[in-house]
Amino acid sequence: MSSHLQSSLEAGLAALNQGDYQSAIATLEAVVTEAEVSPTGLQAQIGLVIAYTRSGNIPQAISLCETLTTSDNSQVQEWAENTLEQLTIRRQTETSAGEDDTGFVPFDNSSPIPPSLALPPPILPPPKITSSPPTESVIKLPPPPPPPPPPPPQNINLGDGNVDQISPKKQTKKLSPTSRTPAQVTTVKWQKAGRAKVWQPLPPISLIPLRLLSAGTFMVLFWVLRELLKWLMGTTNHVLLKLPFLKPLQFLYYDPSNYLVLLLVVALGISPWALDWLLTNWYGQKSLEKDLLNRYSHEAIRVIHRYSQQRGWNFPKLSILPIAAPIAFAYGNLPRTTRIVVSHGLLEQLEIDEIATIYASQLAHVRHWDVAVMSLVLLVTIPVHKLYQQVSNWGDKISLPWGRKIVSVFSSLVYGVWYVLNSTALLLSQLRLYHSDRVACDTTGNPNGLTRALLKIAMGIAKDIEKQAHTSWQLESLNLAIPVSCRQSISLGSTAPRISFESFLMWDYLNPYRYWFTINNTHPLMGDRIRSIGQIARHWHLANEINIESQQSLKLKPQSFLLNIAPVLGIPLGMVLAGFIWLVWQLAYGIKWLNLKWIYDDWTFVLGCMLIGVSVGILIRINFFFPDIKPNTIQTEERFPNLLSNPTALPIDSNPIHLVGTLLGRQGIGNSLGQDLILCSPMGLVKLHYIPWWGTTNNPQDLIGRQVIVTGWIRRGATPWIDIYTLQTQSGKTINSPHPILSTVIAVAATAWGAYLLLIG
């Protein structure tokens, strides 16, 4: 046995005996991958069975036991058969005790492994295991794990979406701010920085940019809807024209602009009641009584009363969603039609003053009138997302492969439409949160409470994603309107306290090129938000909950950034090329040397030059963006915190990485594009980017819920992610993600299209 495998096995067994099951699993799986059938590999597999069992992954433990029952070593075979019997009894006991639909049952991992289950150190050198009698084997085997105690009763169940379950009359445990202990609060030591007792109101700032952006969002939404509608009408008539015995419909040739404007105005007027219906029937929304909110946060009630009375508003309608993730949003078109919605998770996971700051931030959206436009966007996007969900669920029930392919394409198309419509409000969603944070601080005098609330929301969303093993439909469809986005919560909310908030957020306020990477983000950078909130705290002479210094951005050389955006720079360079070509051909025509003026009087050739410019930019960047992954350059989880907390990093700084963890994500057709793939590693969650390749039989969705080894390039932008190179299982199954190949294909296609336009005009 090599010294490397020897030390790895000992490290894995030591972690197992210390109760660090995730580290034990990662280490022992690596040993099994290198030496599966050797005595070392068998010893590692035995340790994995115990680690899986102790960490609650009974299906994986059973699967590995079934493999060990076929071992040539009779002693291993006997142990595996006995253990398999015990695990089967355990699984049946948990199922009858109320196992959930996903097959997951939580276990109490607080107690260490008893001595009877501790694996002894391996004997060196171990003999080669064959089918010889048991006396020739020197592996010492632990006894099978004993049956577990019955699972604890669950007081609150959110599974059926009924908010009545949190009513005080139906709880077995009284829910009050003094009795609840939010889970994530125990993982981070909060400074509990104070709040202002008496404070001067903040000086007013101009709302003109926010108002203009709200109007611009309405116009962009109208334009996108009109173009989609015109495409649909034109495609319908084109199909009808090609079919026999059918004629195109004449009204589909009309310009739909006037009718669409009228429809949007009507939708804006009825948006409060229409969203009431959608959220009640599709999300289980219920009315939140003042008395119940008062039990969670009496300060929130006072803030709403005072804020409404000062402006002559009625007390807004309060609602609650049966969602475990902490979220909140407001909708309506006028102050008197405003509804403020919070989730059950927000009331459970935030403290009294933190809940009040979130309600104050939602009142700010009403005051600034951006809530009206956001309500219209939600009214348009929620039904489209629901269609995407229903089509995906329906397609998962189809058994014919070609039928699933067709439904998968249609589902992806609907998702693309939802994504485009959702993107019309990206800039408004970012800007309005800076204003609402300011009003929340000014209203409550509690900037530190707002800081804690935002970070706890991120942690709660990450915890919900990890618990459900995917991003829920509700979170995805409402993401645009909630205080913290799902995407930025994945790593930010799951790496604490392994990485301090101060370290993680440095990129958000120190990197000079950070705003370029928020163009497609629904929310502003968390570090920037917390720094702005911290400035308010310092203005009132308060200590900061998160010590983010108000300092200038770092000075970085622009070469890496320019290389990062090379495809974008190709657009203006292509326009310069088009101008040069036009000038040359005009001169050639003027001196009667060559007559191609009929081509280049058609300005379509400018688009061709721009496409060629983009292609050149992609080809220049590709080798830097996807460098070769070599053993001496690859990073492991020990370097993961440093990679995330480096404020000078850019996506072009492609660090090859090798991580072990559980693959999370939505299963089925609803994840055909790989848009919901997340790695749950011992260091936290990280988003994965996978390129689906048409015609391949391997799919990462087949590995969801399993332990995988991810190799790829980790990138630090507005949110961290990993571009997958390979996904590998313990058994050796490998799935490739052709990022470099796709980039090359796109570059070649852009060049071909550009050349075609350049030649024919």
Image (cartoon, grey):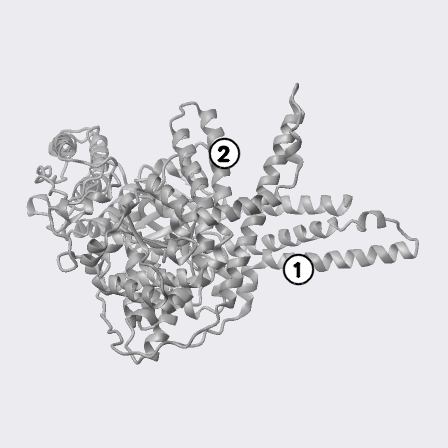
Q: Residue at x 39, y 39 (%)?
A: 700
Nearest to the observer: residue 319 or residue 470: 319
Q: In the figure, residue 359 lies in which quadrant?
A: bottom left
Q: Is residue 362 above or below residue 109?
A: below
Q: What is the tally of numbered marks visible in this picture?
A: 2
On the rendered image, what quadrant is the N terminus found in? Answer: top left
Percent across and percent down for residue 601 are 81, 51
**Residue 262: image x %, image y %?**
56, 46
Give the mark toward the camera: 1 or 2.
Answer: 2
- Image height check: is 126 above or below 10? above
Q: Which residue is mark 1?
A: 572
Mark number, residue 496:
none
* Up/down of 571 relative to 549, above or below: above
* Residue in front for this viewpoint, 691 or 294: 294
Residue 328 seen in render: yes
1 or 2: tag closer to the N-terminus: 2
The residue under the point 23% across, 43% down is 158
Label 1 with label 2: CB-CB less than 8 Å: no
154 vs 487, left or right, is left
Q: Which residue is mark 2?
A: 409
Identified at 79% across, 56% down, the residue is 582
Identify the secondary structure beneath mark 1: helix
- State left or right for residue 682 relative to residue 409: left
Q: For mark 2, does the 10 Å Cα neighbourhood hold few (<14), some (14 to 19), or many (20 or more) residues?
A: some
SS of the residue under disc 2: helix
